[in-house]
Image: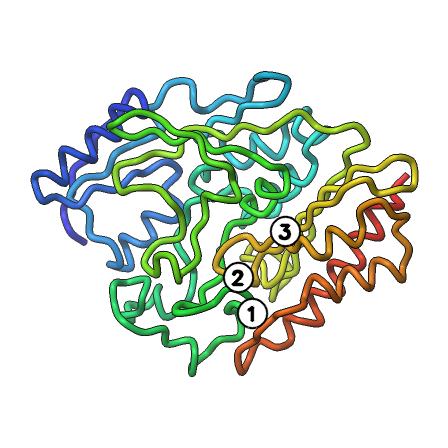
């Protein structure tokens, strides 16, 4: 393993400046918070840092607090803390359930929300040193290779799926991401934070190399808001989603006033399905309507040779989860 130095940052602006300074000196700098993804990449020699910038020393970014009627979640809040927070569980259930579904208890105690959102793909070609688009190469080996867990939406030129459980929940909740860099700060809607491979095949989000995802802002929950996260895996526990769905419904008794459905495990970004949402809005969600919404959610799916099973699997998840959430007492 390559020798590297560690720098502790006191705030996001200093962390961004340290990264900028390192790159001016032609050094490879990476941000490290929980380290559950980055250190694996280092051990696998996918990234070779000269400097690791420690974000766990950032003050004030490991708390959950009220803000403008909603909630502000520091990027360094651990997934375990997030999943157990009483207000998150009550008002933003989908996010608590997504956080508690991640990996193992040990990882949830170290892994942070920002780290989970910004983790790199787990495609076996990328993780095993193939010169693919994500590694700076010029091809996606999954197209004609082992693509069982790859994208059925939004693929090309790369067919990775976004690995985060919390990302679909945050998009479904209309979260906003506070980003800090050397030039200052900006706020980006969660839906605009993630980028398709056709926009940038080498990256999964809009962060510049010297920017930090500092915090996430959630709006106030709407009257009658219900939400949930459902995840299907290829083994019983402790792995990434083969398919997942984050649903947020605004209910008025038995009528769905609005719906947000965001899929995970099926695309290079959290995949929102507005046509399915429109079918549910203003309606009482019956088994028949839930089935129609599920069909609409999968319209346009383009599976590869070995992942067509994701289409009926995702339909079943959307149908069952929408119906169960709408009829929840």
Mark 2 or mark 3: whose residue is earlier in sequence: 3
Quarter of the figure with the N terminus = bottom left
Q: Are marks 2 and 3 in contact (CB under 8 Å)?
A: no
Residue 202 vertical position relative to residue 252 in the rendered view, above or below: below
Q: Quadrant of residue 67?
A: top right
Looking at the picture, tell me which residue is in the foreground, 324 or 201: 201
Q: Real-space Cα distance between discs 2 and 3? A: 11 Å
Residue 93 vertical position relative to residue 1 in the rendered view, above or below: above
- Within 10 Å of disc 3 (Cα), the crowding (few <14, some 14-19, many 20+) is many
- Return the mark for residue 236: none
Mark 2 or mark 1: whose residue is earlier in sequence: 1
Quarter of the figure with the C terminus = top right
Q: Residue at x 84, y 37 (%)?
A: 251
Q: Residue at x 81, y 63 (%)?
A: 292
Residue 3 vertical position relative to residue 13 in the rendered view, above or below: below
Residue named by callout 1: 152
Q: Quadrant of residue 248?
A: top right
Q: Position of residue 313 (x, y in %)?
A: 70, 68
- Return the mark for residue 267: 2
Q: Residue at x 71, y 72 (%)?
A: 312
Q: Real-space Cα distance between discs 2 and 1? A: 6 Å
Q: Are marks 2 and 1 in contact (CB under 8 Å)?
A: yes
Q: Position of residue 183 (x, y in %)?
A: 25, 27
Residue named by callout 3: 262
Which element carries disc 2, helix, strand or loop? loop
Mark 3 or mark 1: whose residue is earlier in sequence: 1
Q: Position of residue 287 (x, y in %)?
A: 89, 59
Q: Position of residue 15 (x, y in %)?
A: 26, 28
- Within 10 Å of disc 1 (Cα), the crowding (few <14, some 14-19, many 20+) is many
Query: Viewed as shown, does residue 180 lie left or right of 270?
Result: left
Which element carries disc 1, helix, strand or loop? loop
């Amino acid at each position: 393993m390559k020798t590297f130095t560690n720098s502790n940052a006191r705030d996001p602006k200093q962390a961004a400046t340290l990264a900028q300074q390192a790159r001016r000196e032609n050094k490879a700098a990476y941000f490290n918070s929980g380290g559950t993804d980055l250190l694996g990449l280092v051990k696998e020699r996918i990234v070779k840092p000269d400097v690791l910038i420690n974000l766990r020393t950032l003050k004030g970014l490991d708390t959950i607090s009220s803000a403008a009627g909603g909630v502000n979640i520091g990027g360094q809040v651990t997934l375990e803390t997030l999943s157990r927070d009483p207000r998150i569980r009550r008002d933003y259930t989908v996010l608590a359930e997504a956080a508690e579904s991640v990996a193992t208890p040990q990882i949830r105690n170290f892994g942070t929300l920002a780290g989970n959102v910004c983790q790199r793909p787990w495609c076996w070609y990328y993780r095993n040193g193939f010169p693919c688009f994500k590694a700076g190469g010029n091809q996606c080996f999954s197209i004609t290779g082992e693509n069982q867990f790859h994208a059925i939406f939004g693929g090309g030129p790369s067919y990775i799926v976004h690995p985060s459980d919390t990302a679909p929940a945050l998009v479904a909740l209309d979260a906003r991401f506070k980003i800090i860099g050397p030039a200052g700060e900006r706020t980006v809607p969660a839906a605009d934070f993630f980028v398709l491979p056709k926009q940038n095949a080498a990256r999964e989000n809009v962060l510049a190399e010297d920017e930090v995802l500092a915090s996430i802002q959630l709006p106030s929950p709407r009257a009658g808001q219900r939400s949930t996260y459902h995840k299907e895996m290829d083994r019983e526990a402790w792995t990434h989603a083969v398919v997942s769905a984050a649903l947020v419904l605004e209910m008025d008794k038995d009528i769905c006033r609005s719906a947000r459905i965001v899929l995970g495990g099926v695309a290079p970004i959290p995949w929102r399905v507005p046509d399915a949402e429109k079918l549910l809005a203003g309606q009482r969600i019956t088994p028949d309507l839930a089935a129609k919404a599920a069909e609409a959610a999968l319209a346009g799916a383009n599976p590869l040779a070995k992942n067509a099973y994701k289409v009926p699997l995702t339909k079943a998840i959307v149908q069952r989860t929408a119906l169960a959430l709408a009829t929840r007492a």
